[in-house]
Amino acid sequence: MLFAVIGVILLVMNWTGIGPPASWNFDLLGDLWKFGLPFFAALVWWSWSDATGRTQRKAIERMEQRKIDRRDKAMEALGLGPKGRKSRRSSGHSPSDSAVRTSAGALEQSEDRDLGRRQDPTL
């Protein structure tokens, strides 16, 4: 894209009479190659980019980033995103205080609480 922009800038500079390109001519054996070189470079760049798969990789990366951004936005809207996690972390509950759901579906207390009950002689 940069090469095409440079080519257009050179053409505009020639037509408006600004800078060195103002004196270039469009003769086939004259300065025409100076105007055509950026466009030729852009053509070569785009051909190489398509042939190596770079264009497709970049498109996939952009789509994946959009998916991640959309998922993060949805999680934040549900209160499950980074902002929601911070507020839950600051509530004072530690992971060891929570109940754990086993594969059978029953709720069991964490091992730390079970150990505390076993060592307590009053229970």
Image (cartoon, helix red, strand yellow):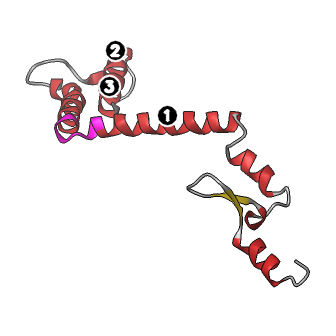
- Name which residue lies at 85% across and 55% down: 91
Image x and y of residue 117, in percent: 81, 76
Mark 3 vs mark 1, CA separation in Å: 36 Å
Magenta range: 50-56
Mark 2 vs mark 3, CA separation in Å: 9 Å
Mark 3 or mark 1, earlier in chain: 3
Residue 65 placement, left or right of 46? right
- Viewer-closest of 51 and 119: 119
Residue type at tag 1:
Arg
Q: Which residue does the numbered mark 3 point to in the structure image?
A: 10
Residue type at tag 2:
Trp
Q: Could you say which disc has been placed on residue 66 in the image?
A: 1
- Name which residue lies at 26% across and 40% down: 54
Marks 2 and 1 close (CB-CB < 8 Å): no
Residue 104 placement, left or right of 80? left
- Viewer-closest of 63 and 21: 63
Q: Which residue does the numbered mark 2 point to in the structure image?
A: 15
Image quarter for residue 69? top right
